[in-house]
C-alpha cells in the first residue's frame, strides 16, 4: 500500500497518560499535515511540516501537544497528560509541494481517553 | 469571521437520482476549494477540486460549481449510487495558497436509498 499510513488505528488510554501517534506519508511527499476530527465535525488543522521543518504549530491545541518529523519522512504526534477532551480522530495527510494542492489523508488514529 | 459551512446537514436520495450538496464560504480571498468524501471509520478521500479562477469543473460523475459572487460552492453527483453514501466535506484554502492549510466545513451526510 503506497498511501498515507497511520499507527495505531485505535488507542484507548486513561486520563493523564501520554500517547504517541505515527504517520508515514506517501513516499517523496515533502509536506505533511496533522488534523484533528471530532464526531460530526470536519477536520481541524493542527500543524504541518515541509520536510523536517515544522512551519506552523500555533494551531496545536495546547502545550501538551507536540509533533516531530526528524528525518523528513515519518512524523509523530504526541499528547502528554491526556484529557477526556482529547478524544478524537487524529488524521495525517501529505502532499507534494509542487502539486495542485490535493491532500492525501490516512485512515486516522482514533483516540479514546477514559 | 472566516468560515466554511454547509446549507444541508443531511441529504437522502434515491439510487439513480442526481445529488447536489451545497457549501457556503465567507473568505472571499480563498483561492482553492476541494470536496472530500469520508466513509465511516475512514480518512477523507479527494473527490474534486477547483481554483477560484474557474466557475465549473467536471470529473467522473461529479461536477463542482463555484459562484464567487455569492461565495457558494456545490457538488453535483450524477446517477447517485449506494456507494456514494458518505459524509461530504467542502474545504477551502485561504490566501497565501501554497501552504494549503485547508479549512473544512461540518459536512453533509448523503444517504442513497436503493
Image: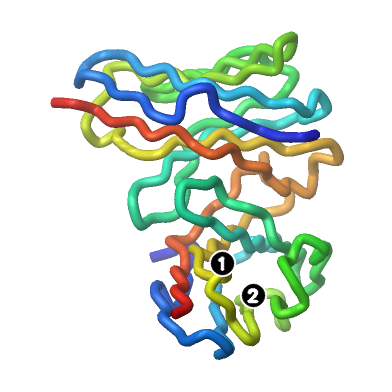
- Marked residue nearer the N-terminal end (1 or 2): 1
**Relative to A100, residue B31 above or below:** above
Q: Residue at x 70, y 31 (%)?
A: B32
| Residue A99 occupies quadrant | top right
Element class at badge 2? loop
| Residue A54 occupies quadrant | bottom right
Report x, y in % for residue A113.
Answer: 48, 77
Q: Residue at x 58, y 88 (%)?
A: A16
Confirm or deny contact between disc 1 and disc 2 (CB under 8 A).
yes
Q: Which residue is mark 1?
A: A25
Report x, y in % for residue A103.
Answer: 59, 49
Figure quadrant of the C terminus of chain A: bottom left
Report x, y in % for residue A18.
Answer: 58, 88
Q: Is residue A68 visible?
A: no
- Pointer 1: residues within 10 angstroms few (<14), some, or many (20+)? many
Q: Is residue A25 left or right of residue B86?
A: right
Element class at badge 1? loop
Query: Between B76 and A94, which is closer to the camera in this rendering?
Result: B76
Q: Is residue A18 left or right of residue A4?
A: right
Q: Residue at x 40, y 39 (%)?
A: B87
- Name the disc covering residue A73, or none: 2
Q: Is residue A30 visible?
A: yes
Which chain contains the residue that carries disc 1?
A
Residue farthest to the bottom, as pictured: A17
Its colouring scheme is rainbow
Which chain contains the residue that carries disc 2?
A
Amino acid at each position: 500500500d503506497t498511501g498515507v499510513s497511520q499507527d495505531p488505528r485505535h488507542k484507548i488510554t486513561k486520563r493523564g497518560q501520554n500517547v504517541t501517534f505515527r504517520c508515514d506519508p506517501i513516499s517523496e511527499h515533502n509536506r505533511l499535515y496533522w488534523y484533528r476530527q471530532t464526531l460530526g465535525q470536519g477536520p481541524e488543522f493542527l500543524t504541518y511540516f515541509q520536510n523536517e521543518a515544522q512551519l506552523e504549530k500555533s494551531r496545536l491545541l495546547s502545550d501538551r501537544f507536540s509533533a516531530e518529523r526528524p528525518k523528513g519522512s515519518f512524523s509523530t504526534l504526541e499528547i502528554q497528560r491526556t484529557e477526556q477532551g482529547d478524544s478524537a480522530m487524529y488524521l495525517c495527510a501529505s502532499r507534494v509541494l509542487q502539486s495542485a494542492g490535493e491532500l492525501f489523508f490516512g485512515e486516522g488514529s482514533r483516540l479514546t481517553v477514559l | 469571521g472566516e468560515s466554511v459551512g454547509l446549507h444541508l446537514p443531511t441529504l437522502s436520495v434515491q439510487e439513480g437520482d442526481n445529488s447536489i450538496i451545497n457549501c457556503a464560504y465567507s473568505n472571499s480571498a480563498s483561492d482553492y476549494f476541494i470536496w472530500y468524501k469520508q466513509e465511516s471509520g475512514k480518512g477523507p478521500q479527494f473527490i474534486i477540486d477547483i481554483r477560484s479562477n474557474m466557475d465549473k469543473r467536471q470529473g467522473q460523475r461529479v461536477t463542482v460549481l463555484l459562484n464567487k459572487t455569492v461565495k457558494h460552492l456545490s457538488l453535483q453527483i450524477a446517477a447517485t449510487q449506494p456507494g456514494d453514501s458518505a459524509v461530504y466535506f467542502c474545504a477551502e484554502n485561504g490566501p497565501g495558497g501554497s501552504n494549503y492549510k485547508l479549512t473544512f466545513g461540518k459536512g453533509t451526510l448523503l444517504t442513497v436509498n436503493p
